[in-house]
Image (cartoon, rainbow, N blue to C red):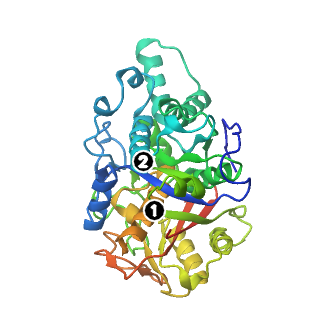
């Protein structure tokens, strides 16, 4: 797994090694269309997006001027003052989401055995903001220079480490770096730690690159939408798709050994029953992208036939070629229009490593509420894309038992995860 750092082992807990089933018992969200799980989910079901002009810096001189920013977030209301100088915006968002997830789970972390609980999160480029701050100090105040490598390493350590320190989680600690696929890869690594003997892992991803340095990096990738219309800037699978909008935020989840959760009477949202990751072939070789294979491997591990999947939460790149590749992979597995597909990230923008974990949260709440969240702003599917896309309004179902979450990262990363009703 590319980019993994800061990991150490834990002592065995409840389940025998290699046999633990992993269930989700807590959800915490910071998203551009809602701060907190309930606010975000209600807004998502109403089809309310959080995309608008960048406010965190002056973006008027850049080709792209829209972003998804978490509304109403005042770090001083949530973060102790001693931590404000030690953290950046994305880490503060992660701390708030982690607190909500642990509160939601009902866990008393102080009562857990030593080393039974840990933290495994994901990030893609949150260190840009810290690096930006260091560069500004260098240029304007004669501050000490910190290299880009140090900036990213610092951010990755802090994003996971501050959660662990704040909640006294002394077990396995790690960070996965696989860009947009990271939110799934981190949860899979958390499940591995449960199978090695841990009881609880706080996991997921919260990311943010709404700063000048981050903006420059996104623009260089040539996938950023330059539309100034919030309702048309990010329309994956649409005939008018021309790129994506960057957002900040994500979801932190509590993944728990099923036996431990049962013994303490925890409320369970769902089970992580399948996961797989693949890499795309080297550009120019003509090989098939790896997403279809990731889907098939995840379904096989879960023991789920394609016909049993109730909804697919798509990666939704917003770039025509990438949208077509994802649609082809879904169609190859499920058939034309063979499964409902949705992309609630059209309401938030793409959140880097936070996007896939937010989609996991959406999948779990879709299972809980028997409803499929909508894809907004998509008016007409591009020619050749034959998906049953949930658009306009939520789609009520008699029940939602199984959801498939897809994620891709720049550089050829692919991940797929299957979550099932408890």
Residue 183 appears in the rendering: no
Residue 269: assigned label: 1
- Near mark 2 (Cα within 10 A), the count class, few <14, some 14-19 or many ≥20, is some
Left or right: 6 in relation to 101: right
- Residue occupying the point 74% across, 53% down: 17
- Residue occupying the point 38% across, 65% down: 344
Give the residue number, with chain letter if any, for mark 2: 106
Q: Is residue 235 above or below residue 192?
A: below
Q: Is residue 91 above or below residue 406?
A: above
Disc with the residue nearer the chain's start (2 vs 1): 2
Q: Is residue 62 above or below residue 224?
A: above
Residue 92 appears in the rendering: yes
- Near mark 1 (Cα within 10 A), the count class, few <14, some 14-19 or many ≥20, is many
Q: Position of residue 308 (x, y in %)?
A: 54, 82
Q: Nearer the viewer, mark 2 or mark 1?
A: 2
Find the distance from the CA under tag 2 to the CA under tag 1: 13 Å
Q: Along the line of sight, which residue is nearer the eye, 82 or 219?
A: 82
Element under label 1? loop
Element under label 2? loop
Q: Position of residue 180 (x, y in %)?
A: 54, 54
Left or right: 40 in relation to 83: left
Q: Position of residue 202 (x, y in %)?
A: 53, 45
Q: Is label 2 in contact with label 1 (beta carbons under 8 Å)?
A: no
Left or right: 123 in relation to 296: left
């Amino acid at each position: 797994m590319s980019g993994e750092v800061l990991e150490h082992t834990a002592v065995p807990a409840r389940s025998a090694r290699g046999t633990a089933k992993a269930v989700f018992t807590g959800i915490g969200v910071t998203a551009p269309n809602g701060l907190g799980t309930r606010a975000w989910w209600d807004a998502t079901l109403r089809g309310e997006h959080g995309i608008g002009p960048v406010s965190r810096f002056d973006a008027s001189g850049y080709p792209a001027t829209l972003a998804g920013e978490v509304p109403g977030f005042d770090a001083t209301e949530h973060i102790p003052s001693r931590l404000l100088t030690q953290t950046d915006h994305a880490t503060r968002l992660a701390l708030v989401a982690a607190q909500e997830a642990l509160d939601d789970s009902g866990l008393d972390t102080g009562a857990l055995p030593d080393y039974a609980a840990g933290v495994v999160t994901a990030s893609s480029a949150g260190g840009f903001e810290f690096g930006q701050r260091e560069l500004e100090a260098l240029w304007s105040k004669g501050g000490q220079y910190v290299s880009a490598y140090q900036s990213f390493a610092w951010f990755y350590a802090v994003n996971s480490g501050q959660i662990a320190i704040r909640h006294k989680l002394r077990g396995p600690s790690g960070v996965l770096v696989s860009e947009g696929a990271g939110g799934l890869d981190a949860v899979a690594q958390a499940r591995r730690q449960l199978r090695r003997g841990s009881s609880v892992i706080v996991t997921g991803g919260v990311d943010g690159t709404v700063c000048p340095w981050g903006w420059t990096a996104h623009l260089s990738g040539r996938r950023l939408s330059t539309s100034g219309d919030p309702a048309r800037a990010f329309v994956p699978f649409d005939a008018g798709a021309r790129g994506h909008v960057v957002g900040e935020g994500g979801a932190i989840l509590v993944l728990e050994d099923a036996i431990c959760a049962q013994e303490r009477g925890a409320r369970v949202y769902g089970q992580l029953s399948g996961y797989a990751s693949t890499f795309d072939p080297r550009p120019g070789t003509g090989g098939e992208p790896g997403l279809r294979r990731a889907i098939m491997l995840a379904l096989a591990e879960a023991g789920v036939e394609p016909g049993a999947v109730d909804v697919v939460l798509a990666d939704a790149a917003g770039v025509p070629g990438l949208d077509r590749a994802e649609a082809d992979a879904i169609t190859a597995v499920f058939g034309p229009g063979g499964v409902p597909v949705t992309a609630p990230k059209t309401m938030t923008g793409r959140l880097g490593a936070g996007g896939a974990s937010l989609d996991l949260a959406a999948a779990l709440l879709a299972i809980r509420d028997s409803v499929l969240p909508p894809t907004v702003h998509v008016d007409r599917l591009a020619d050749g894309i034959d998906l049953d896309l949930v658009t306009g309004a939520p789609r009520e179902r008699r029940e939602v038992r199984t959801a498939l979450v897809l994620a891709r990262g720049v550089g050829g990363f692919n991940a797929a995860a299957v979550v099932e009703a408890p």
